[in-house]
């Protein structure tokens, strides 16, 4: 058997339930080497460093 609602849910009640589904803005931190904005716990795309160590060699 499938779930069958006993009474109709109003649009306001339905939308109240869906109100908490909004996306949050991604968090950014400054790179400790070059100062560019990076997502935390990721390698910096600008200088290729992570945790003050060079991970991706730059030319």
Image (spheres, rainbow, N blue to C red):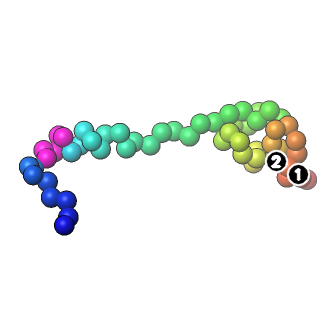
Check contact, mark 2 vs mark 1: CB within 8 A: yes
Asked which secondary structure carries label 1, the reply is: loop
Residue at (25% x, 39% y) in the render: 16
Asked if residue 10 lies in the magenta stretch, the reply is: yes
Q: Main secondary structure of the magenta part?
A: helix
Asked which secondary structure carries label 2, the reply is: loop
Q: Residue furthest front?
A: 1
Taking 45 as reference, is 31 above or below it?
A: above
Picture quadrant of residue 12: top left
Residue at (85% x, 49% y) in the render: 55
Mark closer to the observer (2, 1): 2
Quadrant where the N terminus sits is bottom left
Which residues fall within the magenta stretch?
A: 9-13
Classify residue 37 as left or right of residue 22: right
Classify residue 18 as left or right of residue 24: left
Classify residue 13 as left or right of residue 38: left
The foreground one among 59 and 32 is 32
Q: Which mark is residue 37?
A: none
Residue at (80% x, 42% y) in the render: 50
Residue 30 image position (x, y, % from top left): 72, 33
Q: Which residue is mark 2?
A: 48
The foreground one among 30 and 17 is 17
Mark 2 or 1, nearer chain start = 2
Residue 56 image position (x, y, % from top left): 85, 52
Residue 59 image position (x, y, % from top left): 91, 53
Picture quadrant of residue 13: top left
Real-space CA distance between mark 2 and mark 1, rounded to the nearest whole angstrom: 7 Å
Taking 59 as reference, is 24 above or below it?
A: above
Q: Which mark is residue 58?
A: 1
Residue 54 image position (x, y, % from top left): 88, 45
The foreground one among 37 and 43 is 43
The foreground one among 36 and 14 is 14
């Amino acid at each position: 058997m499938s779930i069958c609602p006993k009474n109709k849910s109003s649009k306001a009640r339905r939308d109240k339930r869906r109100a908490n589904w909004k996306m949050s803005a991604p968090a950014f931190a400054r790179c400790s080497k070059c100062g560019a904005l990076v997502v935390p716990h990721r390698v910096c795309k600008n200088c290729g460093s992570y945790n003050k160590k060079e991970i991706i060699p730059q030319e």
